[in-house]
Image (cartoon, rainbow, N blue to C red):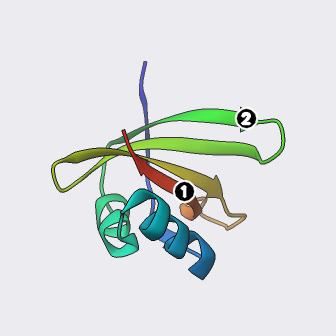
Amino acid sequence: MPMSIWVAELRVSDATAAKISSKHGLDVDDIRAAIVGVPGLTFAWHDHPVRGLRAIVELEVGTHPVLAVLYPVDDALGDTWNLGSAYRV
């Protein structure tokens, strides 16, 4: 059964924004618009041996399916995430 995720705040470092732009041709503002405050985003947990627990989220940017890698942030509500990467499927 697919799970959904709620993202109220998405934190993106300058290095991650540069990486997804140069390597994957995606704009961080488009990624943010496709994730923040969007109900029903499908995701799956992935426990990476080095990077730890992260959520792989399915989203659409324009007409392109995209996967975003989100890392949980320790906050009171649990709805703040760090963007690790994003790439077209």
Count of labels shown? 2
Amino acid at circle 2: Asp
Horizontal relation, residue 48 to residue 56: left or right: right
Is the residue 55 above or below the residue 45 in the image? below
Mark 2 surroundings: few (<14), some (14-19) or many (≥20) residues within 10 A: few
In the image shown, does 4 or 16 lie closer to the viewer?
Answer: 16
Q: Is residue 30 above or below residue 3?
A: below
In front: label 1 or label 2: 1
Q: Which residue is at a point 43% across and 57% down the rendered structure image?
A: 24
Q: Secondary structure at mark 2?
A: strand
Q: Position of residue 87 (x, y in %)?
A: 43, 50
| Disc 1 to disc 2, C-alpha distance | 15 Å
> Which residue is at 30% across, 51% downward?
39
Q: Which residue is mark 1?
A: 85
Mark 1 or mark 2: whose residue is earlier in sequence: 2
Based on the displayed image, in which of its 4 quarters is residue 4 positioned?
top left
Residue 67 visible in rendering:
yes
Whether 20 is drawn above or below 43: the answer is below
The one of 23 and 80 positioned closer to us in this rendering? 23
**Residue at the extreme right of the image, as rendered:** 50
Q: Nearer the viewer, residue 89 or 59?
A: 89
Of 4 and 85, the residue lying toward us = 85
Q: Residue at x 68, y 63 (%)?
A: 73
**Extreme residue in the front direction:** 22
Question: How far across and down, in percent of the image, does residue 34 sit?
Answer: 30, 60
Q: Which residue is mark 2?
A: 47
Asked if residue 8 can be seen in this view, the reply is no
